[in-house]
Amino acid sequence: MDETYVKVAGRWVYLYRAVDQFGQVIDVYVSKRRNTEAARTFFQHARTTTGVTPVEVITDRAPTYPRVLDQIWPAAWHHSEQYANNRIEADHAQLKRWLRAMRGIKTMTGLRVVAIGHAFVQNLRRGHYVIAADEPRGRRLAVAFAELARAI
């Protein structure tokens, strides 16, 4: 899990994202602050969303994470070595590339919707869902949206 900062209506906010060991974006959370309460809320939301208790949690070296992880998941191994969370750090650039093209986000709800939609599209492209997973990588998104359109 990691967080990045994004400008919403002229103010910097934090976008927390959780990614599993296969690269699937699991959860997204937006907060005005990067503090203990925001981290606790994010971890609890990710746990209720997935219903899974992690064995290993990889984060950066933010001082709030060890305390929160010890309270929520005391048995989980907290991995915070340098470069351990490169997978999600590199993933931030893709999201920010979309946001720059949109000329910014105006509301926190708008950021949450865009971040969740971006995660959904990335998960489709990477073949994490059954829908269009057997298609070639370049066609997964088109086939998945065609199937979703028929279902709706």
Image: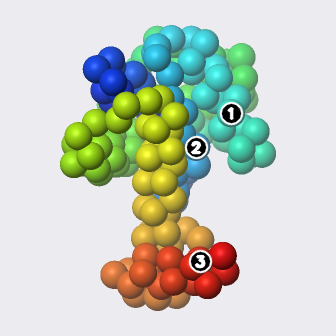
Along the viewing direction, whichever of 109 and 1 lies nearer the viewer: 109
Relative height, residue 77 to residue 54 (above, below): above
Displayed quadrant of residue 111: top left
Could you tell whether 40 is left or right of 120 in the image?
right
Which mark is on residue 27? 2
Query: Do tag 2 and tag 3 residues touch (Cβ < 8 Å)?
Result: no
- Relative side of 138 to 32, left or right: left
Say few, some or many: other residues with alpha carbon within 10 Å of mark 3 (under 14 / 14 to 19 / 20 or more). Answer: few
Are dots 1 and 3 in contact, CB under 8 Å? no
Instruction: Please name the residue shown 64% across and 20% down the image.
Output: 40
Looking at this view, is 116 or 50 the one in front?
116
Tag 1 residue: 45
Task: Determine crowd level at label 2: few under 14, some 14-19, many 20+ residues with C-alpha closer than 10 A.
Answer: many
Badge 3 amino acid: Leu
- How far apart in space, not on screen, are marks 1 and 3 (Cα)? 27 Å
* Mark 2–mark 1 distance (CA, rounded to whole Å): 8 Å
Among numbered discs 2 and 1, the one appearing first in the sequence? 2
Determine the image quadrant of residue 130.
bottom right
Residue 74 at least partly seen: no
Tell me residue 29's x, y (percent).
Answer: 54, 33
Pointers 2 and 1 in contact (C-beta within 8 Å): yes
* Residue found 43% across the figure and 61% down from its top: 122
- The residue sitting at 23% across, 40% down in the picture is 103
Amino acid at circle 1: His
Q: Tell me which amino acid carries mark 2.
A: Asp
Label 2 vs label 3, nearer the camera: 3
Residue 12 placement, left or right of 108? left
Q: Which residue is mark 3?
A: 148
Q: For label 1, count other residues whose C-alpha is less than 10 Å away and answer few (under 14), some (14-19) or many (20+).
A: some
Secondary structure of the residue carrying tag 2 is strand
